[in-house]
Image (cartoon, helix red, strand yellow):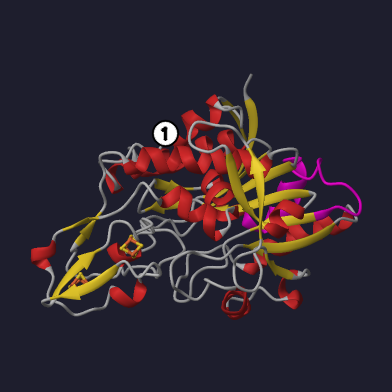
Amino acid sequence: MSSKVYFLPWNKKGELYSFLKVAGIFNHVKARNFLAVKIHFGEDGNEGYIKPEYVLPVIKIAKEKTAYPFLTDASTIYVGERSDAYHHLLVAHKHGFSIENCGCPVVIADGIKGNAEKKVEVNMKYFKDVYIANEIYNADGFIFMSHFKGHGIIGIGGALKNIGMGCGSKAGKYAMHHSSKPLVEYELCVGCGNCIKKCYQNALSLVNKKIVMDEEKCAGCGQCISNCALQVFKLDWSEGAATVQEKIVEYAAGVLKNKSSSYINFLTHISKYCDCFRLTKNDPLMNDIGIVAGNDPVAVDQASYDIVNKAFGKDFFKELYPKIDSTVQFDYAEKVGLGTRDYVLIEC
Ligand code: SF4
Ligand code: SF4
């Protein structure tokens, strides 16, 4: 059976409040529920994140339902401005995610040091248990607000990525990334040392002015890839992307287990990399397209993918990442029962 997915073109973005009501994505929200509105606040220097003005209608509707909405995200595993709650909250505030602008508090879901988590049993292909950020686990229900764009490891970052990777604790994020250790072309290294301080695992060191990676310590976070201008580090495309996507889906299954949820994807400021990175001079790569919403994360991501490709005229994400099949996540999510790739698009 197909899922209903709703689309609001970007030139009608002023109608977001009524669009969200028509899309029926608050039907699951109940009075006095602690409703986690999961979003990415954007790394310091990033501009692609969903802006606070678009959060406001979401919070307004949640409050009309007398729920208790809060904005949330969890700590990153790379060293940046969002790797603990203290700095994460400062960045969120800097980017405008204040109570005044959004109408609700911001809660970093895995605690001040990013180590507050709950174990959830899933019994799937890669994981028996997954580790979810504490206040995500404690939420009664979810609205996932996801910026739909490219992603350096899995090709696409949309709702499934926001649920699975975004809600995992640090330990969970390590577990999902672990199969994507970079390949290292040691001879290209000039020994500048820039990458070493970005490696939270202390897996990098210089020996005779050349970088050395300790494979036992490496957790596959990919930070060194984006922090070496000489491209000494490269992804092992042969298996990492598909495996990481399937692991993300298993984490998504753990997050959504026994919880109600709905999904809003923003097809705006579309970039090659996710919001953990500063935008490059080429971003955004196309004009803003619109907003996709629904109650099925697979259908919402599939529709977003199709709409972007239609706007581009061919497979946009394949052009960005020729060696990644980023639809593995849709297939696997459908297979494990998170939703369907089959959807009916209703344009508002
Ligand atoms: S950033 Fe690149 S060039 Fe500099 S030490 Fe690291 S691997 Fe070598
Ligand atoms: S070596 Fe690179 S991929 Fe591995 S943990 Fe360090 S920064 Fe992350």
Residue 344 versus residue 194 in the image, above or below: above
Residue that numbered label 1 is attached to: 328
**How many C-alpha atoms fall within 10 Å of the one at disc 1: few (<14), some, or many (≥20)?**
some
Residue 80 versus residue 306 in the image, above or below: below
Nearest the camera: 43 or 207?
207
**Res 194 → quadrant:** bottom left
Compared across the picture, whether 6 is left or right of 319 comes to: right
Image coordinates of residue 345 in percent, x first then y, are: 59, 32
**Res 53 → quadrant:** bottom right
Return the residue found at the far front: 216
Image coordinates of residue 318 in percent, x first then y, are: 31, 41
Please say whether residue 120 is one of the residues in the magenta stretch: no
Give the residue displayed 51% in from the left and 48% down from the top: 161
Return the residue found at the far left: 187
Image coordinates of residue 10 in percent, x first then y, are: 56, 53
Give the residue displayed 35% in from the left and 65% down from the top: 223
Give the residue displayed 53% in from the left and 56% down from the top: 171
Compared across the picture, whether 53 is left or right of 335 comes to: right
Quarter of the rendering occupied by the N terminus: top right
The secondary element bearing badge 1 is classed as helix
Compared across the picture, whether 219 is left or right of 209 comes to: right
- Start and end of the magenta stretch? 13-34
> What's the residue type where badge 1 is placed?
Val
Give the residue displayed 63% in from the left and 52% down from the top: 132
User: Ligand 1, what quadrant?
Assistant: bottom left
Nearest the camera: 199 or 161?
199
Compared across the picture, whether 346 is left or right of 101 comes to: left
